[in-house]
Amino acid sequence: MSDDAPIGRIAIIGGGTAGWMAAAALARVLGPEGPAITLVESEEIGTVGVGEATIPPIQAFNALLGIDEDDFVRATQGTFKLGIEFVDWLRPGHRYFHPFGVYGIDKGAIPFEAMWQRLRLAGEALPLEAYSICAAAARSGRFMRPQPGNTPLAHIGYAFHFDAALYARFLRGHAEAAGVHREEGRVISVERGRPRDFIEAVLLADGRRIAADLFIDCSGFRGLLIEDAMGAGFEDWGHWLPNDRAVAVPTANVGPPTPFTRSTAHGAGWQWRIPLQHRTGNGLVYASRHLSDDEAAATLLAHLDGEPLSDPRPLRFRTGRRDRFWIGNCVALGLAGGFLEPLESTSIHLIQAGIARLLEMLPTRAFEPADTRRYNRLMAAEFDSVRDFLILHFHATERRDTAYWRESASMDIPETLAERLAIHARTGRVYREADELFTKTSWLAVMDGQGLVANGHDPLAQGMPMDELRARLNRIAAVTQAAAGHMPAHADFLARHCSARR
């Protein structure tokens, strides 16, 4: 592989969400004149499929594929998501909401959070949720897409809940229509080339040989190519994020679907609730050091809203990421590249980020090492920033009722997170580092929701008269709540635009 010609063949090993996202995106962008794309998957190997909640960047992925959003929601039995409600995380009985979109409106160079923090120190600020159109709409079960104009409705941020298996099927249809060829089969060995950090082909159980210039590993936790064959290495984050198992069960719907995900803390983990059109997804994520599998299943079954539709399904995982995501002509996506528990619904986004960067640095047959190094550096930074955001939820808590929470509250945290917390504690400032995933809204929502209170405020807000500051924020809150009241009910919006019953 020394010439600089375009790659002619791409092999994607593994289907599921990661495999079919990669196949659909590559086929769409590279077009019919691009490389031949083959996806190898086996019906014998199941997919994990716990990621049924997403975050707003998925809108960009759907737009890339030219997907009609109503068709997408209908085909996947989906609903809309305005954020996440956190229950019992700070302490039992406490709730807060992490909304998409933004809080309030900046005043020139003065960020909204600086004005709010100054008013909070004076004891006059309303809770943060009062200034969020997404939080106000979620609390009242309402939804609509953003509207043009100088109104809070222009700042609606949203994502989706959907059936992961239906999503993979939906993407498969797009990919195959764009020319992707699917091969049914189970990979049993990998044929290495020269140099040794290149793959020549994979061999299937029935003797077929699949050769390619570029291999994309979507084989799940095992990392059949990136780890078993290429020895990428793994950075384990279990000391920061101790949850290593989950148990999931669908239930019948009770009432109309809410436009938000709910996350409820328990003694040794947390429970998700994800409403779909045809059912509700539920699961308990927990640390096996603190809770047995039987206890986890019993805890989940005791805290369901509706009737279970199947037996609880156990899952095991290891939190962390590969030391290298790209080696030679092999790139890992999805669980093959790493896993961060589904607390903030980041799994599908990390697949999307990997695909976007691969397209940005699409190699020739020369496989320029500088591209590989840059890809690995950027993907590591992406995972690391999400890791810090997740750790925040567990570390910043008043809960001391179980060993699980005591250990979480007292653990050493990464320096990058400690620096953020120190800045916030002094001035209430929050920031978004470069193009990292989570916005200032997200950091502010979770820091405040988890009980972190700043001792001072940003000097940028100091020169604003208190009467003006007070009037401005009260007006923002009033307009926000009024705007939310004009939005249709989430269930009505679904019925009108994207009901799966059509």
Image (spheres, rainbow, N blue to C red):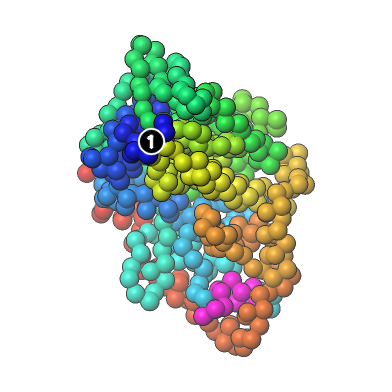
Which amino acid, by three-letter code, is at mark 1? Answer: Asp
Residue at left offset 52%, top offset 37% = 325
Residue at (63, 50) in percent of width and height: 388
Which image quadrant: the C terminus?
Answer: top left
- Tell whether position 333 is magenta: no
Q: Main secondary structure of the magenta part?
A: helix
Mark 1 lies on a secondary structure that is: loop
Residue furthest toward the front? 3
Q: Which of the 4 quarters of the picture holds residue 240? A: top right
- Residue 151 is drawn in which quadrant? bottom left
**Magenta residues (range):** 108-119
Neighbor class of circle 1 (other Cα within 10 Å; few <14, some 14-19, many 20+) is few
The residue furthest top is: 206
Quick check: 31 left or right of 291? left
Quadrant in which the N terminus appears? top left
Q: Position of residue 115 (x, y in %)?
A: 60, 77
- Percent coordinates x, y for residue 132 in the rendering: 49, 66
Q: Is the residue 87 above or below the residue 37 in the image? A: below
- Where does the image place residue 113, in percent across and percent down from the top left? 59, 71
Residue behind mark 1: 3
In depth, the one of 235 and 272 nearer the eye is 235
Residue 23, placed above or below residue 228: below
Q: Position of residue 356 (x, y in %)?
A: 41, 47
At 33% across and 68% down in the image, what residue appears?
147
Residue occupying image coordinates x 27% and y 50%: 66
